Amino acid sequence: MPGGAFLLNSGGGMADYGGGLTVPVVVTCLMAASGGLIFGYDIGISGGVSEMESFLEKFFPGLLKRTAHANKDVYCTYNNQALTAFTSSLYAFGMVGTLLASRVTRRLGRQVIMLVGGSLFLAGALVNAAAANVAMLIVGRMLLGLGLGFSGQATPVYLAEVAPPRWRGGFISAFPLFISVGYLVANLINYGTSRIPGWGWRLSLGLAAVPAAVMVAGAAFIPDTPSSLVLRGRHDDARAALQRVRGKGVDIGAEFADILAAAEHARRNEEGAFRRILRREYRPYLVMAVAFPVFLNLTGVAVTAFFSPILFRTVGFESDAALMGAVILGVMNIGGILASGFAMDRYGRKLLFMIGGALMFTCQVTMASIIGSHLGNGSKMPKGYAVAVLIATFVFSASFSWSWGALYWTIPGEIYPVEVRSAGQGAAVALNLGLNFLQAQLFLAMLCCFKYGAFLFYASWLVVMTAFALAFVPETKGVPLESMGHVFARHWYWGRFVKEQNKFGDEST
């Protein structure tokens, strides 16, 4: 049936899910995915505000004096642990928020977790805007981090559970798309507020309340996921929620029966989700929960996003040009995410890994070569080479968004069985935020120590992660969530851990 999605039934045939790309499911998924705005906005704002002289003068006057008289090692000009703590503290508390959300999401539901996340982020934005000292800044970052942790744990799982299987990749990619939109908006705001003397940084930080309010409003008007409602025993509400997102008149009987069966399977094997995911038969999911955030951070994109204005100034651009470069970087992110959302449900996930990995590797090596040859002690890079670094950064950003940027949220959000879904997604997001913290805190020191070798470090890891994706990440294009176990059971390596099963639990003969 056109617009239908299919699931292997217990007899080995194909069960037809009714429904398709309806207005309710589009609206619901877009409202949920709007939570990505707060991720992107904060990433963009943090790097740009760190470049504003009025911000540095109030909170980091020593660093401002050093940049004004920098005549030695340009790689080390911005190496200041207090400044990087302003950025990195958010991700430390984001990790804490994710772990807390993972513990309570099954009892409270995905929708409530997203509401709490948006509310915490809103409070943090207001505290940061009113900050009078570094301690107040850090408190605001703590609240922002907890908000990111809650929303990052719940939103991708929400999208995976609500989206029709045939378009699931595209819908989940709406979350990183909103991250990219938030990043672009933040850099546009930074570009404007940098011209406001004295308090422009307050406006940049305070406007984080806008995407937070959008997320709270969006979460307030969407239903919880059918899977989450069933796990809490609210079967009638679950059926109503499924009917709402699939559209009136659509036969949801087969899909709802599979959701009930998956939930029953989870109850029959009741055990703490975090303890359960450590068992041998869940080994592939545990590996993915660890590998994806580790590899995501080893692409080098996090530091490029956080510190792109500083990086551009290091290679010779003035402050305004550096901020505008970050704006263009945001546009490239959006282009990559849109292309990825179009391609992943048509050509599969592996093609995106291959193309993105090859392009990112080329860009990292190019940047290392140019920076290593033309940036030395006390010197600024010649303009032509600086532009080449800028272009390589843009291509790298688009390539990342096309591949790991979109697939980091898509694949972990769709592969976990329902009984470990909250633990798997929570562990992946918590580890990602923890690694974001380490990178944000250490990158400027790493740049000072390794210089252009930092880019070669990331390039070498791109080879490793691309090979891992091709060999160990199964193709999940168009596979319903409830059939994901079949994909792992038939994989050349993961099949030794995951048994081929009939519908939810009985080993096939």
Image (cartoon, helix red, strand yellow):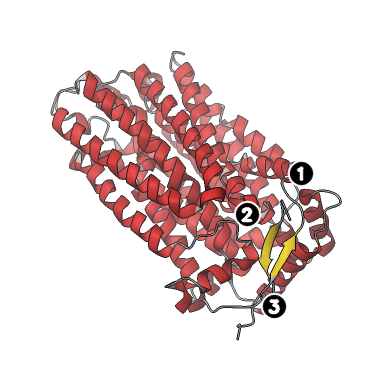
Question: Measured from the top left, where is residue 464 in percent x and y?
Answer: 31, 56
* Residue tagged 3: 11
* Residue tagged 2: 160
Q: Nearer the viewer, residue 19 or 79?
A: 19
Question: Measured from the top left, where is residue 255 in percent x and y?
Answer: 75, 63
Q: Of tags 1 and 3, which is closer to the observer?
A: 3
Name the N-terminal-most of marks 1 and 2.
1
Q: Which mark is residue 384?
A: none
Asked whether residue 66 appears in the rendered view, the answer is no
Residue at figure coordinates x 60%, y 57% from the top left: 478
Q: Which three-letter amino acid code belongs to the residue tagged 1?
A: Pro
Q: CA distance from mark 2 to mark 3?
A: 25 Å
Q: For label 1, count other residues whose C-alpha is less than 10 Å away and answer few (under 14), some (14-19) or many (20+).
A: some
Q: Nearer the viewer, residue 122 or 509?
A: 509
Name the N-terminal-most of marks 2 and 3.
3
Secondary structure beneath label 1: helix
Question: Measured from the top left, where is residue 352 in percent x and y?
Answer: 44, 48
Secondary structure beneath label 2: helix
Left/right of residue 115 with respect to residue 434 in the rendered view: right
Name the quadrant of the N terminus: bottom right
Asked whether residue 468 appears in the rendered view, the answer is yes
Q: Which three-letter amino acid code belongs to the residue tagged 2?
A: Ala
- Contact? badges 1 and 2 (CB < 8 Å): no
Name the N-terminal-most of marks 1 and 3.
3
Q: For label 2, count other residues whose C-alpha is less than 10 Å away and answer few (under 14), some (14-19) or many (20+).
A: many
In the displayed orientation, state which residue is furthest to the front. Answer: 1
Left/right of residue 71 with respect to residue 220 in the rendered view: left
Q: Is residue 135 above or below residue 279?
A: above
Left/right of residue 101 with respect to residue 468 in the rendered view: right
Q: For label 3, count other residues whose C-alpha is less than 10 Å away and answer few (under 14), some (14-19) or many (20+).
A: few
